[in-house]
Image: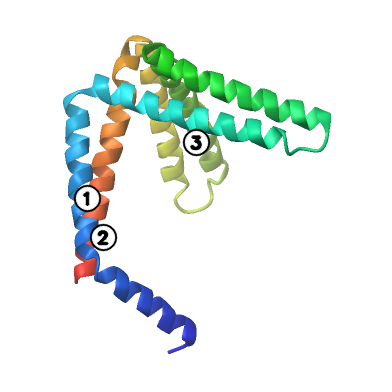
Amino acid sequence: MTLRGDALENVIGKTRDKWGWFVGLGVLLLILGGIAFGNLFIATVASVYVVGWLMLVAGIIEIMHAFGVKTWGRFFYWLLSGLLYAVAGFFAFDNPLLASAVLTFLLAVALVASGALRAWVGYSHRPERGWGWIVAAGVISVIAGLIIAMGWPVNSLWVLGLFLAIDLIFQGWTFIAVGLALKK
């Protein structure tokens, strides 16, 4: 075996020793996903707060970066960008319901746009194998985006929480599967 193969096998061996941590994390994520499903409104507000913190931190970093830029034009670009991020982060904390409505609308727009692009790319690759799956995935994304848009703004109270709950449950099952695979 090569030196690189030995190093990889060593890393895999050390990871196998920790298989229980993967399973434990998976179970924890499944529990959190179940709690999120139990109260989608609170899960939505929690996700808005997470996005708010991320925007606030990004804004602070961009403002700090502005002071390290050499030209005035770029300084004002980074400063303005950082201030907008920071204001948006504060906005998410000040009015999480309105922020969830904005984020839900942006999610609907993103799903429609990315789904339409995916369907177009798949359709443009018609002679190749699997193009239909790409088109189907794009159409499903467009439909999901349209369903969210049609229920907006009322559904903004639970849509983000639903996405969070589904993500936590899928991540939980993934960690459990990886942990059990490492055990073997």
**Residue 45 showing in the rendered view:** yes
Residue 142, position in %: x, y? 43, 27
Q: To which residue does mark 1 refer?
A: 26
Which sits in the foreground, 159 or 69?
69
Q: Is residue 55 above or below residue 20?
A: above
Q: Which mark sits nearer the N-terminus, 3 or 1?
A: 1
Q: Residues within 10 Å of mark 1 (few under 14, many from 20)?
A: many
Which sits in the foreground, 5 or 47?
47
Give the secondary structure at mark 1.
helix
User: In the picture, residue 50 is in which quadrant?
Assistant: top left
Which sits in the foreground, 129 or 8?
8
Q: To which residue does mark 2 refer?
A: 178
**Residue 152 showing in the rendered view:** no
Q: To which residue does mark 3 refer?
A: 119
The dot on residue 15 is none
Give the secondary structure at mark 3.
helix
Type of residue at label 1?
A: Gly
Q: Which mark sits nearer the N-terminus, 3 or 2?
A: 3
Tag nearer the camera, 3 or 2: 2
